[in-house]
Amino acid sequence: MPVWNPWHGCHRISAGCLHCYMYRRDAEFDKDSGVVNKTADFDLPLRRKRDGSPKLTNEGRVYSCMTSDFFIEEADEWRRDAWRMIGNRPDLHFVIITKRIHRFYVSLPDDWDRGYENVTVCATCENQKEALFRLPLLLDAPLAHREIICEPLLEEVDIGRFLSSGMIEKVTLGGESGPDARPLDYDWVKSVRAQCERTHTDFYFKQTGARFVKDGKTYMIDRKNQLAQARKAGIDLYF
């Protein structure tokens, strides 16, 4: 999975941030996750190998800013250059996952119009409160591609009204990992899947999380097995 992290560091803004993997990883190296800085890979989309070929190739989607938030305040000026690099690589498809869809318009490039065809923006909603706040903003934003990320899902959510718009291409759902993971109930998973099925929206059950509840029983699942256990459910949808 190609990844591009132009900057690193973030600030918690909602319930889904509580046990973020980035904070756990930084703590292992005594690193302050609250300090937002450009990374050494900031200009990765523009870099070339000795033979002149691009270092970042079009082998699937490029997941961008996975150790920060693309729309975080400290990156407002850097984002102008990041958009410029994205615009210069139409051969790549950049996926941006954000909890800050409310800041989407800050530093937007002049040539954005209705959105770059090579960009998918995914708004996260870990609970109903964030779904009601973020998803209308996602629908209103001028985008060529939109997706919803329910990860970590912390309660049952009703997002059917947003899926009915026909503007959401996919919903990805997963539980929380780590030693303090909060539970993911399989009934919540099936509820979102049913909403996707009714609206003909692709659905991807990514991972169970560490604390998975099914039929009232809680299962503790090792990190290495969480994706595989989700695959075994066999409930993904593709239309």
Image: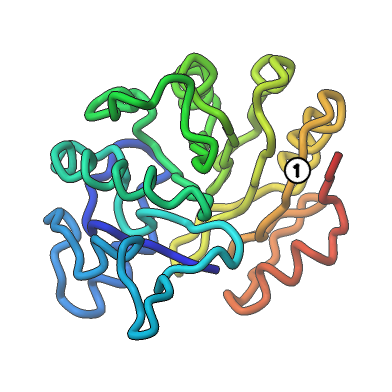
Q: Give the amino acid at mark 1.
A: Phe
- x and y, in percent, of residue 135 in the image: 52, 22
Q: How is the image coloured?
A: rainbow
| Displayed quadrant of residue 105 | top left
Q: Secondary structure at mark 1?
A: strand
Q: Residue at x 26, y 67 (%)?
A: 41
Q: Is residue 236 above or below residue 229?
A: above
Residue 166 occupies quadrant: top right
The residue sitting at 21% across, 56% down in the picture is: 9
Q: Position of residue 223 (x, y in %)?
A: 57, 74
Question: Where does the image place residue 70, in percent across and percent down from the top left?
Answer: 32, 44
Q: Residue at x 56, y 29 (%)?
A: 144
* Left or right, 38 with reference to 161: left
| Residue indicated by mark 1 | 203
Quadrant position of the N terminus in the picture: bottom right
Instruction: Give the vertical position of 229 relative to 10 (above or below).
Output: below
> Quick check: can you spot residue 124?
no
Picture coordinates of residue 38, whole percent (x, y)? 16, 59
Q: Residue at x 12, y 56 (%)?
A: 35
Front one among 106 and 28: 106
75 relative position to 162: left or right: left
- Position of residue 85 in the picture relative to residue 156 (left or right): left
Decide which of 111, 223 is in the foreground and name it. Answer: 111
